[in-house]
Image (cartoon, grey):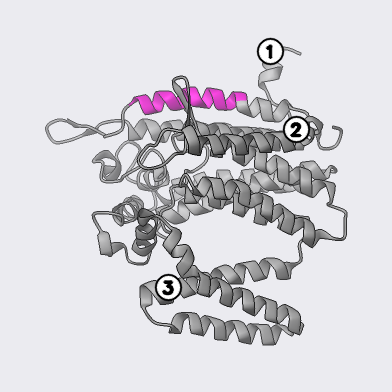
């Protein structure tokens, strides 16, 4: 096999081309973010060092190595090592809490010489492999609800450790991936509907208690739920369980609220009313919407974004990089970026649906769930539709750990597309 052939990964070439385009777009936006803007009399400091761009180039090369690893590693071998790999990632997460450096009040990294790694990113990969291993072995069984509940308990292991760092956004990734996997697994729709309605009850209860200072929003939601249960003609046991779950989560939300860090509480409150702290916790959301709105249909043109260039937009090279795309490339540029992710998701679902091996199917669905949650959440945050939680835009935002993780997961998609029929 020639070296050039090895550098061309097997599998779906459309997925590989999408990875290349996303990587090139990331470099283009980061170059813009680190370029000084021309003022009337001088060049204005962009506030983000040019080294960010060069480090992203290096990480993109490393990410390509991770992609090749994910694409060439035999699926049978990944299935066999899924359990010990997941346990190893849990050990790293525990070590992070014990010996990891505390940076800005959080312990999320482990120092390995001059390099800092984020074990929660590795845990995303091993978690998907672990869930694919567990669900794949019982995919044709009839007793799926006990397996589903067991997989949920396993999901809480990394979630609890990551919440201790604290990193609420990353912990939610695991729950989102779990939902995608168990949906594909064939869990009864009533179970997922119940979980969704319980989450909605918690939101309405929180809004009533903390924002509106009135019981009516939650009371109205419960009345609508009762009507829906009546019209659905559910059995009495199922209806009672759903109602109890909704009331329990609604009553329990104040206890969960008290466990959140102060900055997390402030972010959520600012989401409901950004003007309550326009120059503090609400500043990111406000400036992000201003940047995207300034772009209009065609953008302010590449390198010409003023919100970005004058450093009005915080975290413009990481969590809010989509705002830079919206400002400089406009609606159509942002749409092109989202279409690239849509192609990746569409091809992944296709390969999951035709793969013969259960393990391969669940690996593909886990990867797709990861990208769907990351992209939807990041875009919703930058457009003001969700509270700020600190999730990067995969393959676009600056950051080595997430870029490597996302590239490995794309490699796993290529692996499934190339080998699921004969490996």
Residues tagged 2 and 3 counted as in contact (Cβ below 8 A) = no
Q: Determine crowd level at label 1: few under 14, some 14-19, many 20+ residues with C-alpha closer than 10 A.
A: few
Magenta extent? 50-65
Q: Which mark is residue 3?
A: 1
Residue 355: give x, y in percent of width and height: 81, 43
Residue 172: give x, y in percent of width and height: 55, 52
Q: Is residue 282 above or below residue 161?
A: below
Residue on which the image places disc 3:
207
Mark 1 vs 2, N-terminal side: 1
Please state if 251 lies on the left or on the right of 123 as rendered.
Answer: left
Please state if 63 lies on the left or on the right of 284 as rendered.
Answer: right
In the foreground, 22 or 288: 288
Return the residue found at the far front. Answer: 98
Q: Quadrant of residue 357?
A: top right
Q: Is residue 186 visible?
A: no
Q: Quadrant of residue 265?
A: bottom left
Is disc 2 placed on a helix, strand or loop? helix
In the foreground, 283 or 202: 202
Q: Is residue 146 above or below residue 334?
A: below
Measure the alpha-carbon separation of dots 1 and 3: 59 Å
Residue on which the image places disc 2:
81
């Amino acid at each position: 096999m020639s070296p050039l052939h090895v550098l061309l990964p097997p599998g779906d070439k459309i997925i590989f081309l999408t990875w290349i385009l996303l990587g090139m777009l990331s470099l283009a936006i980061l170059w813009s973010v680190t370029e000084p803007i021309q003022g009337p009399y001088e060049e204005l400091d962009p506030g983000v060092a040019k080294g960010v761009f060069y480090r992203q180039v290096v990480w993109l090369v490393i990410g390509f190595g991770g992609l090749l690893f994910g694409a060439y590693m035999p699926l049978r071998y990944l299935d066999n090592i899924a359990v010990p790999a997941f346990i190893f990632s849990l050990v790293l997460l525990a070590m992070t809490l014990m010996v990891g450096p505390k940076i800005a009040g959080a312990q999320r990294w482990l120092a390995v010489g001059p390099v800092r790694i984020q074990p929660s990113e590795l845990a995303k990969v091993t978690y998907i492999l672990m869930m694919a291993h567990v669900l794949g072995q019982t995919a044709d069984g009839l007793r799926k609800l006990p397996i589903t509940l067991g997989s949920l308990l396993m999901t809480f292991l990394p979630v609890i450790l990551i919440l201790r760092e604290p990193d609420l956004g990353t912990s939610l990734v695991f729950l989102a991936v779990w939902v995608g996997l168990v949906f594909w697994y064939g869990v009864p729709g009533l179970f997922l509907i119940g979980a969704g309605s319980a989450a909605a009850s918690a939101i309405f209860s929180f809004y009533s208690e903390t924002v509106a200072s009135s019981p009516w929003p939650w009371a109205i939601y419960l009345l609508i739920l009762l009507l829906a249960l009546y019209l659905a003609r559910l059995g009495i046991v199922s209806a009672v369980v759903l109602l109890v779950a909704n009331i329990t989560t609604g009553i329990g939300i104040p206890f969960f609220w008290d466990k959140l860090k102060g900055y997390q509480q402030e972010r959520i409150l600012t989401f409901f009313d950004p003007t309550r702290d326009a120059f503090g916790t609400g500043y990111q959301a406000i400036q992000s919407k201003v940047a995207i709105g300034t772009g209009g249909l065609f953008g302010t043109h590449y390198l010409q974004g003023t919100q970005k260039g004058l450093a009005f937009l915080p975290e413009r090279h990481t969590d809010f990089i989509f705002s830079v795309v919206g400002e400089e490339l406009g609606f159509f540029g942002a749409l092109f970026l989202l279409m690239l992710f849509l192609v990746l998701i569409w091809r992944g679902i296709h390969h999951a649906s035709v793969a013969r091996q259960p393990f391969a199917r669940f690996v593909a669905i886990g990867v797709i769930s990861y990208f769907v949650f990351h992209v939807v959440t990041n875009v919703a945050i930058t457009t003001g539709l969700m509270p700020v939680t600190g999730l990067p835009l995969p393959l676009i935002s600056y950051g080595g750990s997430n870029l490597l993780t996302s590239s490995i997961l794309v490699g796993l998609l290529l692996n499934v597309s190339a080998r699921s029929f004969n490996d």
